[in-house]
Amino acid sequence: MKVDVLLGLQWGDEGKGKIVDYLSPNYDIIARFQGGPNAGHTLVINGEKTVLHIIPSGIFREDVQNVIGNGVVIDPTILLKEIDGLKAKGLSLNNLLIAKKAHLILPTHRYLDAASENAKGKEKIGSTLKGIGPTYMDKTGRNGLRVGDILTPNFKEKYQALKDKHLALLQIYPNIDFDLEGEEKAFLASIERMKSLQMVDGPYFINQALKKGKRILAEGAQGSMLDIDYGTYPYVTSSNTVTAGVCTGLGVAPKNIGKVIGISKAYCTRVGSGTFPSELFDKNAEELQRVGHEFGATTGRPRRCGWIDIPQLKYAIMINGVDEICLTKIDVMNEFETFEAVDSYELDGQQTTQIPFEVNDSIKVNTKSFKGWNKDIPSRNHNDLPAEAANYINYLEQELETPINLISVGPGREEIIIK
């Protein structure tokens, strides 16, 4: 058996949570391989909305094991709130496991995140202020605390040493309001509760499951264009969001990577700062935002909206080795008389379909226009798609040289067309 992968092809918010939930009955294990509570995976089940931040999106399938991998960074307070919320919905959470090598987000990580972002002024990168960046910095700087550390007798000494380091670093930033005492109290209480959760040696667990023939789906957070190496740097997240991140985030050898499923909206969005070549600033942007309910699941911030970007998607497909695509939110396009797709860029007077080294505001876009279908897509049969919608999907498949096998036509669990 191999580990299949599902990840976002744009700047995040593509609808990964819904698709993981939909596909999870086909798997024995769903495993998050990177990111942290800066993620917001939205599921709508029987009309009820749930937003997951750290817990994998297969958690509602009680016969499927859900693993928080060692590439994830965990805020214990947020994790326990998420667990309590799911238990209130009637879930047992007996199918939740946590890798011991996953790193912990301390209150002072969030303090540093907020202070650093505040100090940037107009140069803010759009951090979610969840402490993600400082935690990954400590991880690579070999200072971090891991989940397994909470079971060691000298955990409090380790915690105090890292906290003291953070307090010293905070002296370089202007002062901000942060209730460290209250946050620390909640953190330590959550650490005590975490000790009763199921913990595993992640790489051994995953690889032994593969040997036993278990079917595993690796779930990504954020999107490919936010990858620390391959995204629109420096306006990126702090982890590897691409397929390669599965190997380091779960302890899987490259030869054990199976099918890669990429998720893309029928248009494009971005939260926070950073260049966004296909961004719109007209009534079309307002319509996409309104109909698509484009507000961050984690931050509540309005998402910037634009047309789908073919050069950007080709790039993401290339670096991820995408085998098939799931196209989401095509129902948002139901009301448009016409809409467009970016098919190439113009940079320094030259036309290109490649992402340049630095993605900045000097990029101009060339677009192709499409006729809308001006009707709902209630059917779950691919053959019943409006001709205009089918034409758009065929265009995307040809340009991206990748099949679109799943099409989401609404937020609900079953609102999916299988090609």
Image (cartoon, helix red, strand yellow):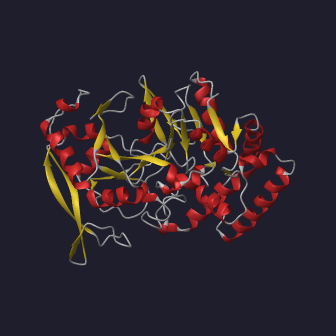
**Tally of numbered tags:** 0
At x 66% / y 45%, what residue is drawn?
204
Determine whether 183 is above or below 406 in the image. Answer: below
> Which image quarter: residue 53?
top right
Give the farthest residue toward the right: 153
Spot occupied by residue 152 in the image (x, y as percentages of width and height): 83, 47
Left or right of residue 334, residue 49 in this image: right
Residue 89 visible to the viewer: yes
Can residue 75 be seen by looking at this rendering? no
Q: Residue at x 14, y 40 (%)?
A: 388
Q: Nearer the viewer, residue 229 or 286?
A: 229
Classify 254 as above or below 265: below
Check the image and report above or below for 126 versus 352.
above
Q: Position of residue 153 (x, y in %)?
A: 87, 48
Q: Quadrant of the C terminus?
A: top left
From the top left corner, tell me how far across and down residue 283 is, in percent.
23, 50
* Figure check: 174 above or below 192: below
Q: Between 188 and 117, which is closer to the camera in this rendering? A: 188
The image position of residue 303, as x and y in percent, is: 38, 50
Q: Nearer the viewer, residue 403 or 46?
A: 403
